[in-house]
């Protein structure tokens, strides 16, 4: 039966798809290039029938998962693979779409490729709006920087003791005037950009709230459970769920730490063992929210205010994990800084351990949701 399996590699681009196939023990051969459109893809599958013998793969990239969903709908077993983990020969200096497709087909047959998690439609929709908010926050920060640096260049400084972008700061900003009309126009444009970015963020956060309410029951339960942790409010919890997907797919928390790129790099040989900075090779969106949440654990453990409200209706098991996280991570931070460790590096270590507690909460919430 194994000999009858045919492995297909697709080198996917915005307009074209290079196709190659490996059958039996052969080297593989190119099947040419087809347009990246639904009808040519359907014809390709029909040409390669029976679909039960097909195993198709392509690299994750800017074209997303539309091709995966179409192939799955046609009954074809397809996997999306991590492009950074595709084997590369050191002496190979020729790269073409045809050769890339053939290499994918051969590597897939030999089991050398690593598949990535493909979200379902609900996950993908929620992740799109969460990432749109993240982009809006970056745009807002850039707009604020442009405005503040423009004012600094012209010697316009807020009153002593005024924190940036507080209500007092905004009142001062509205009173700033310039002698020349061109500078007034510049100031107006920069202020408008800041206000527009803030409105955009508000709209997207409302959309996230609505999307979470309409999300599948299990996903919604995990989002609510994660908010029991300190530093993990709704936006952070939603980001964790949309970027990780099913927490149970990670057998142990160390794998999730690696997925977030928070494990130390290492170069060891023989008796020599050298560890360096974190790899940063994982999911950057996940790593960002983990580091932001980790900063809250430098404060002494407590449960009050909004954090206490977020724990209403949460199981005692998850509350216990949350409290244990506060005690352990706070102790970890101060133990590291008392030894002279840089606060930023200490927070990175705390974020790495926080992943373990997030994994525990996520897995527990998924179990409780499945049993309900």
Image (cartoon, helix red, strand yellow):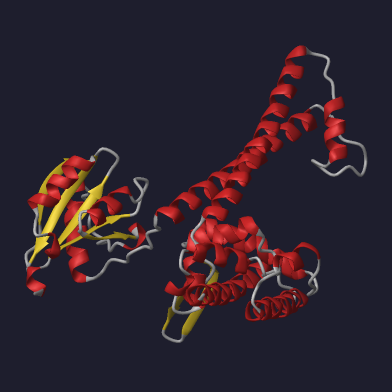
Left or right relative to 134: residue 119 = left
For the point 51% across and 77% down, the residue is: 253
Q: How many marks?
A: 0
The residue under the point 84% across, 21% down is 177
**Residue 156 location, quadrant:** top right
Q: Residue furthest right?
A: 160
Q: Is residue 304 above or below residue 368?
A: above
Q: Give how far across and how far down residue 206 sits, in percent.
A: 62, 45
Residue 266 visible, this angle: no
Q: Is residue 205 above or below residue 323?
A: above
Left or right of 212, for residue 99: left
238 relative to 48 in the view: left or right: right
Judge by depth and name the residue closer to the eye, 337 or 362: 362
Percent across and percent down for residue 332 are 70, 78
In the image, residue 64 sits, relative to residue 144, either above or below, namely below
Percent x, y of residue 173: 83, 30
Note whether residue 350 is visible. Answer: yes
Residue placed most toward the observer, 81 or 37 = 37
The extreme front residue here reads: 372
Q: Quadrant of the N terminus?
A: bottom left
Among the 4 quarters of the image, the one containing residue 81: bottom left
């Amino acid at each position: 039966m194994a000999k009858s399996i045919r492995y297909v590699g697709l080198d996917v681009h915005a307009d074209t798809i290079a196709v190659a196939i490996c059958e039996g023990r052969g080297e593989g051969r190119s099947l040419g290039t087809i347009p990246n459109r639904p009808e040519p893809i359907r014809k390709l599958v029909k040409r390669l029938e029976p679909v039960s013998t097909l195993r198709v793969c392509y690299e994750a990239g800017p074209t997303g998962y539309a091709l995966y969903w179409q192939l799955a709908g046609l009954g074809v077993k397809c996997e999306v693979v991590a492009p950074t983990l595709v084997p590369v020969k050191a002496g190979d200096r020729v790269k073409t779409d045809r050769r890339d497709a053939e290499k994918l087909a051969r590597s897939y047959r030999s089991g050398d490729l690593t598949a990535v998690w493909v979200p379902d439609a609900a996950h993908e929709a929620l992740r799109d709006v969460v990432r749109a908010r993240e982009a809006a926050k970056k745009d807002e920060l850039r707009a604020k920087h442009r405005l503040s640096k423009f004012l600094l260049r012209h010697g316009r400084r807020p009153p002593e003791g005024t924190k940036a972008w507080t209500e007092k700061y905004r009142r001062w900003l509205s009173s700033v005037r310039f002698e020349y009309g061109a500078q007034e126009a510049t100031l107006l444009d920069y202020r408008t950009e800041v206000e527009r970015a803030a409105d955009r963020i508000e709209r997207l956060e409302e959309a996230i709230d609505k999307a979470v309410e309409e999300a599948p029951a299990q996903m919604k339960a995990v989002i609510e459970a994660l908010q029991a942790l300190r530093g993990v409010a709704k936006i952070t919890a939603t980001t964790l769920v949309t970027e990780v997907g099913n927490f149970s797919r990670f057998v142990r928390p160390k794998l999730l730490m690696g997925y977030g790129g928070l494990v130390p790099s290492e170069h060891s040989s023989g008796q020599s063992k050298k560890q360096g900075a974190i790899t940063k090779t994982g999911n950057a969106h996940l790593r960002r929210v983990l580091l932001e949440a980790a900063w809250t654990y430098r404060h002494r453990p407590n449960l009050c205010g909004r954090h206490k409200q977020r724990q209403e209706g949460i199981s005692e098991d998850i509350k216990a994990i949350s409290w244990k996280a506060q005690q352990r991570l706070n102790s970890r931070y101060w133990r590291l800084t008392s030894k002279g460790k840089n606060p930023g590096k200490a927070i990175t270590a705390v974020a790495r351990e926080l992943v373990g507690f997030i994994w525990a909460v996520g897995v527990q919430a998924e179990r409780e949701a499945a049993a309900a």
